Amino acid sequence: MKKLLFSVCFVSSLLLSCSSSDNSESNNNNTKGYDRTAMLTNWADNIIIPAYENYSSKVNTLSQRTAAFTASPDASTLASLRTEWQNAYTAYQYVAMYDFGKAAELYLKQSANTYPTDVTGIQANIASGTYNLNLQAQFTKQGFPAVDYLINGQGTDSETISFFANANASAYLTTVVNQLKTIAETVTADWKTNFRSQYIQNNGTSVTSSVNKTTNNFIKNLEKDVRTAKMGIPAGLFSNGTTFPDKVEAYYKNDVSKVLLNAGMQAEVDFFNGKAFNGTSTGASLKSALDDVKVVRNNQNLSDIINNQFNLVFAANNTLSDSFSQQIVNDNAKMLAAYSALQQNVVYIKVDMMQALNMTIDYVDGDGD
Amino acid sequence: MHDKIKAYLNSYTDSASLAFYRIAFGFMMLLGLIRFALNGWIDKFYIQPSFHFTYYGFSWVKPIGMYTYGIFILSALSAIGIIAGYRYRTSSLTFFLTFTYIELMDKTTYLNHYYFTSIIAFILIFIPAGAYFSVDSFKNPEKRFTKIPRWTVDILKLTLAIVYLYAGLAKLNSDWLVNAMPLKIWLTGHAGLPIVGSLMLKSWVHYFFSWFGTLYDLGIVFLLIYKRTRLLGFAFVVAFHLLTSLLFPIGMFPYIMIISSLIFFSSGFHKKCLSMLAVTLCIPLSKSEGDTFYKPKNKNLYKGSILLVTVFMLVQLVFPFRYLCYPEELFWTEEGFRFSWRVMLMEKAGYAQFVVSDAESGKSLLVDNEEFLTRFQEKQMSFQPDFILEYAHFLRDHYRAKGFAHPEVRVQCYVALNGRLSQPYIDPAVNLADEKESFAHKKWILPFNENIRGF
């Protein structure tokens, strides 16, 4: 009897002492794929930081083109400004989902891509010549959508060039691009200096752990920024049937909504599969985590179910016109079909993947029983 | 038979047992309430949300704005009253009412251990736990009794026995025992732990935890009842509950159960604990000497309360089996799931996209749940039919006020249960605006198409 009691106490204290020291040291355990440290390292070094470097460099080029254009506004400097705007906007799609750390602190997402842009507000800012883009009320008057209005929303090339004859207008363009550049560079620098190690060290399982936070942002981006903002709202799904062809992303350029949507989708797919930003190699990821704990649903890997659905999403997206404004007016049913395809994957990811990986949707921190 | 019952009701035990339990329980409740407040949950769960999910028949129980804090303060004060044994009846009644009111305000936060707390608090009203080592007995020697009827201690043991046994029975199902679900999911989430992390991925570990948990729940009460195995049983209780508290976010529950299981110990043990407490606090254990047997002030009231708690316990025994009255899979429909000791039993998650349309204009819109619900509420709503219906009715009223002539509410809902691929949960064609809440089976829940065998 006493021996039995002793052994029970011994075994249980062993179990307890082993499991109570959560994350006290960086774990080099060989739990393949589900190693959170490996996952975070791959995300930080091969995906997030390279994506930010790329974004930063694209915004930097945009800033140079802006300087060239405002110095000598002509058709050629305007054309290269427009090209770089689109390149930087596309690069942005690959960092939009990492809305935490410095990016959240500086409102990178809100200041870079709040649309539809506030045309009246922009005109008022230009007229007054005084504005503070750091204020939340100014988020609708800056970022890529504001640049879109400034360089693509003024009519013909010559009308655009003459619009910038106004020194205030040209100063506004410069300030807006500078704001993008400052934030992009600060966030990138922060990732490369302090934040990376902090991010990887936070390798636990709590709601505030890096894996949980990043995964939640990945889902939030898919659900809110890609599905709802790029497709659902313009297609009238949230507004009792009233469609909004003018609420599409890059409305003034108008023929790049699909390019930007697909870039946003590709960023999601690559993140899910752990694919390096600069290359084709893959590393520890949500997909490898699912595979390593052998998550099978209906005799199929859940990771395959999700990737197959991503393929269906791209197939549906590719039936759409380059201009979603036109697509919504001409044949909104196709927008709705593309929305549904994506919606199904939101369910697979938010419900099935999260359940399989035992992760919580963020900030639900009440007790369970 | 009748004589035996009479003899049982007239057998006595030391009142130190109830006094011990009163203090231990009151203390855990006070800690629980303080923890709840410090976590900011009063504001987060009861003040901030604009909409609350209510229990059928209790929709009148609602948070009352900033006064909600008052309910918590009153509840904490009555817990202190219970600990001190000060105006014990009033304190225990107030605690039961305030605590139960809090739990009924929003079923989003439903937890089995809150239900357990309400049941214990209810029983405490009727038993003389304030008769010894209490302010009441110190102030008025007539309220002091050293011997109390045995049933008043046994009823607490019985309550605990029901919780464990029923929790054990509920685990006797094919998902839990044959598939090691949902522990397979929950434990793999801990693969990042140092040293034991890799174990958490092992299949045998999932099965070991599942079977051990079942045997623990089914057997622990028997280990605790017999004197010879009691210490071993308690070692199991401590080990089991501490382990669960480390692995799962279950708050105060493990500690409440550990403390509660001490009621199975002898009254000698309880007296020793009280003596130690008395020495620490520099107060006497009792102000007067000699044994006094419990005498109710009002005999008829006493008889009435025995009858009442007997009926109450019978209901406790039967109520968890009410799921047998419903067709379809219990885990899927959750009809009869709550209030039946199904503790940490399944992993369920859902996604609910509501569509509100106006029958007049034929137009429709998708609802953004975050506009009305907190994330916690949305999470709980998306896989529980009664939540879905209540929310649908809220949406109907909301959009009617917004100018929809005849709002119809439908939902595209997907639910994943214990690691099965998510599948449609609610009939997307049914207009939930016209469906009524009742205890009858909800026919608009789509079939599960699988069988989970067992209890």
Image (spheres, rainbow, N blue to C red):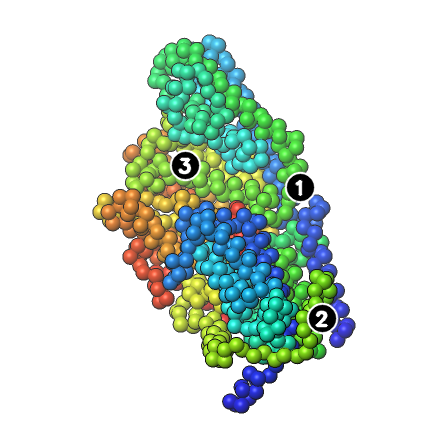
Residue B417, position as x, y percentages in the image: 48, 59
Nearer to us: label 1 or label 2: 2
Quarter of the figure with the C terminus of chain A = bottom right
Q: CA distance from mark 2 to mark 3?
A: 67 Å
Indicate the chain on which mark 1 is placed. Answer: A
Task: State the residue at coordinates (56%, 43%).
Answer: A213
Task: State the residue at coordinates (52%, 77%).
Answer: B297
Residue that carries the numbered disc 1 in the rendered image:
A201
Task: State the residue at coordinates (41%, 58%).
Answer: B61
Indicate the chain on which mark 2 is placed. Answer: B
Direction from residue A72 to residue A332 in the image, left or right? left
| Label annotation for residue A229 | 3
Residue B375, position as x, y percentages in the image: 47, 48
Foreground residue among A302 and A19: A19
Q: Secondary structure at mark 2?
A: helix
Q: Secondary structure at mark 3?
A: helix
Q: CA distance from mark 1 to mark 2?
A: 48 Å
| Label annotation for residue B103 | none
Nearer to us: label 2 or label 3: 2
Q: Secondary structure at mark 1?
A: helix
Q: CA distance from mark 1 to mark 3?
A: 33 Å
Question: How many dots with numbers?
Answer: 3
| In this view, B408 is above or below B272 | above
Amino acid at circle 3: Ala
Asked if residue A351 shows in the view, the reply is no
| Label 1 close to label 3 by CB (< 8 Å) | no
Mark 2 vs mark 3: same chain?
no
Lower position in the chain sequence, tag 1 or tag 3: 1
How packed mark 3 is, by other alpha carbons closer than 10 Å (few <14, some 14-19, many 20 or more), is many
Residue that carries the numbered disc 2 in the rendered image:
B272
Quarter of the figure with the N terminus of chain A = bottom right
Foreground residue among A317 and A183: A183
